[in-house]
Image (tube, rainbow, N blue to C red):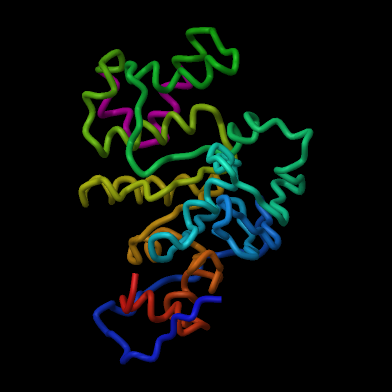
């Protein structure tokens, strides 16, 4: 347990966030994490994590740098295992099946649980080929079907109208915000159930950030979305539930409305009010 306390005078620079209660406990649980512990060699990075992720909701994970947010995110599709000397205990159930089950196909898991990274990472290919790449890997070769997937994915990522006349141009010619929406479209093209986002707007300008946030709000109608963010206002704007991580532990997890307006732990209140982080 962290030794951090909130004995300092309360800082009032952060405005009280006005939120609506949007979480619905009747929605299906997609991920259920129970007593998850993770070590990088001898470093205990995640400590007894218990979280549920529900369908058609945005779950925000907040907390200071190095608190385990991104590590937990990458554990959900086992990308964390690409790091040497990682070991875990505990359970993560995805649609009621353990993601650590030896019979589980890890590549299939990563298809169903897509990932969008902090820095846009388009392939060194055309805009069209960036989107078609995943479906081709999965055996789709029919050009009419690929054309439909490319257009639908780009439309769903709110970028079709900006790129429809330059589909065969290099993706590197797009702006940073466009590249990030392209990467989201690339993720959508393989029809995931869950989208993991690791600070997807931290490298973007304010205008591009708002476009991505609008996109996230609309995507939750069809996907479970888990987003790691350092931006408190962003978490308040787009998420249904918020988990506050500190020193590898979940200090508080509740509806975003409750976390921001009625936190149960003084450390949560201190972080939200900008006393550390």
Residue 178: image quadrant is top left
Give the main secondary structure of the magenta stretch. Answer: helix
Coordinates of residue 121 in the picture (x, y in percent): 35, 32
Q: How many marks?
A: 0
Q: Quadrant of the N terminus?
A: bottom right
Q: Quadrant of the C terminus?
A: bottom left
70 relative to 202 in the view: left or right: right
188 relative to 55 in the view: left or right: left
**What's the residue at 44%, 55% (across, down)?**
228
Residue 249: image quadrant is bottom right
Q: Is residue 156 magenta?
A: yes
Region rendered in magenta = 148-165
Q: Is residue 228 magenta?
A: no
Instruction: Examine the rendered structure and indicate whether residue 14 appears above or below residue 128.
Output: below
Coordinates of residue 266 in the picture (x, y in percent): 46, 84
Coordinates of residue 3 in the picture (x, y in percent): 48, 81
**What's the residue at 33%, 61% (across, down)?**
231
**What's the residue at 40%, 41% (across, down)?**
117
Camera-nearest residue between 124 and 31: 124
Q: Residue lying at the far top in this picture: please name it.
A: 142
168 relative to 251 in the view: left or right: left
């Amino acid at each position: 347990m962290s030794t951090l306390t909130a004995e300092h005078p309360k800082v009032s620079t952060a405005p009280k966030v006005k939120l609506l209660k949007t979480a619905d406990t009747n929605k299906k649980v997609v991920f259920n994490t129970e007593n998850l512990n993770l070590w990088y060699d001898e470093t205990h990075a995640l400590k007894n994590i218990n979280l549920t992720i529900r369908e058609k909701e945005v779950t925000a994970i907040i907390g200071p740098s190095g608190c385990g947010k991104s590590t937990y995110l990458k554990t959900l599709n086992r990308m964390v295992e690409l790091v040497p000397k990682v070991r875990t205990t505990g359970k993560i159930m995805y649609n009621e099946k353990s993601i650590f089950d030896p019979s589980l196909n890890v590549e299939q898991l990563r298809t169903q649980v897509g990932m969008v990274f902090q820095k846009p990472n388009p392939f060194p290919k055309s805009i069209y080929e960036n989107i078609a790449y995943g479906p081709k890997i999965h055996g789709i070769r029919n050009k009419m079907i690929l054309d439909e997937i490319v257009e639908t994915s780009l439309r769903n990522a709110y970028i079709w109208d900006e790129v429809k006349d330059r589909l065969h141009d290099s993706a590197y010619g797009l702006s940073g915000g466009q590249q990030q929406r392209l990467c989201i479209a690339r993720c959508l093209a393989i029809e995931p159930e869950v989208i993991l986002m690791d600070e997807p707007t931290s490298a973007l300008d304010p205008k591009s950030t708002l476009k991505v946030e609008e996109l996230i709000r609309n995507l939750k109608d069809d996907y479970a979305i888990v987003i790691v963010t350092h931006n408190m206002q962003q978490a308040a704007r787009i998420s249904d539930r918020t988990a506050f991580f500190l020193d590898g532990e979940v200090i508080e997890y509740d509806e975003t409305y409750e976390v921001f307006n009625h936190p149960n732990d003084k450390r949560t209140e201190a972080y939200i009010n900008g006393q550390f982080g």
